[in-house]
Image: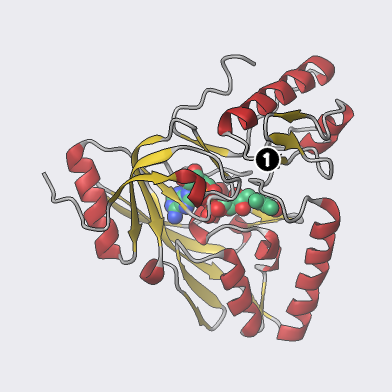
Amino acid sequence: MADRPSAVLERYPLSRLTTVGTGGPARYFARATSLDDLAACLAWAASSGIVVRTVGLGSNLLPADEGFDGLVLRLEKGLAGTVVEGDVVTCGGGASLAAVVRKATDAGLAGVEFGCAIPGTIGGAVRMNAGAYGQELRGILLDATVISAVGSRTADASGLDLRYRRSNVTDSEVVAGARLRLVASDTTTVRAAIRLLHGRRSAAQPRKVRTFGSVFKNPPGERTSGQLLEACGLKGYAVGGARISPVHANFIENVAAATSADVIALMREARRRVRDEHGIDLEHEVELLGAIALDDAT
Ligand SMILES: Cc1cc2nc3c(=O)[nH]c(=O)nc-3n(C[C@H](O)[C@H](O)[C@H](O)COP(=O)(O)OP(=O)(O)OC[C@H]3O[C@@H](n4cnc5c(N)ncnc54)[C@H](O)[C@@H]3O)c2cc1C
């Protein structure tokens, strides 16, 4: 059995690692700051039969109140850098999109502006094929390197099967880094585009409140999840400390020390109402961590 790395902590509160601020403890948690660190954590977990999951900035993650019986990894420092060379930006999986957008803008590169209002990491954005305003990560991804206990692979957007808010990156795989191909522009033009997107975002979504972004994916058809949920009269509907945002019905806000159980109860009720009133089964966009069953009671 591989030695347990000294960076591994026990019973770490997942509520500290997510933007919504709910959830119980991870049995183990480690910050991997280099590829060697990451390999050591993965080898130890594999040889001990411990399941692994990576968190980025936890901006699309709902952990169970009972916690997660495995190892949660977070990529930092040496796995969170951003380097610009020509029109290619090389990022660690733990680099925040905000930092990548800033560096690209300073270098006069366009293409990643849509990421300015997505509060996650490059690793999370690859796994989720994050996108906004009609653009997605797959449009700018040159390739990403994905590591697991059994080896590594480097693949482009089609090799990673990037589709609407999904990819073939599995729970036990870690996106350690990615390269983005951008387009030469100039800093002033890119800054102006970003200002415009920030303005659109703050008019349409809840601000200064804990959420995890979109709750449900948009279904095929004319209407978005937000429009369907709003048509069901769900804006402002609350369970415990969680409520459906009065600003945008596809967001759930943690307004008063909510638990994940509160959030799950809201999600079940929202799905039931949309199914009953519109005959549409909404699929959740938020990623679940630990034992959470959304489907059994809906
Ligand atoms: C206010 C707000 C607005 C948002 N707006 C948008 C938006 O416009 N568009 C959009 O697409 N999303 C949006 N989101 C959701 C979220 O920011 C994105 O899904 C983002 O890509 C998640 O990145 P993360 O690093 O926080 O991932 P996390 O939330 O930490 O994790 C999400 C999933 O990715 C996995 N993961 C994370 N890092 C890695 C890694 N390095 N390797 C392998 N797997 C990993 C996790 O295990 C989990 O399955 C929003 C969220 C908030 C709170």
Q: Quick one: 289 or 227, which is closer to the camera?
A: 289
- Residue 225 is left or right of residue 6, and the answer is right
Q: Is residue 188 above or below residue 30?
A: below
For the C terminus, give its image quadrant.
top right
Dot 1 amino acid type: Ala
- Residue 67 is left or right of residue 2, and the answer is right
**Residue, far left:** 1
Residue in the picture at 53% in, 76% down: 88
**Label 1's element?**
loop
Q: Is residue 272 above or below residue 234?
A: above
Q: Is residue 2 visible?
A: yes
Q: Position of residue 190 (x, y in %)?
A: 74, 77
- Residue 69 is left or right of residue 287, and the answer is left
Q: Which residue is mark 1?
A: 256
Residue in the picture at 59% in, 56% down: 138
Q: Quick one: 271 or 150, which is closer to the camera?
A: 271
Q: Quick one: 272 or 115, which is closer to the camera?
A: 272
Residue in the picture at 49% in, 66% down: 95
Q: Position of residue 169 (x, y in %)?
A: 44, 45
Q: Quick one: 118 or 279, which is closer to the camera?
A: 118
Tally of numbered tags: 1
Image colouring: secondary structure
Q: Position of residue 86 (x, y in %)?
A: 54, 83
Q: Position of residue 34 (x, y in %)?
A: 31, 66
Q: Neighbour class for label 1 at 10 Å: few (<14), some, many (≥20)?
A: few
For the N terminus, give its image quadrant.
top left
Residue in the picture at 61% in, 14% down: 297
Q: What is the quadrant of residue 7 in the picture? A: bottom left
Q: Is residue 269 above or below residue 38?
A: above
**Residue, far front:** 256
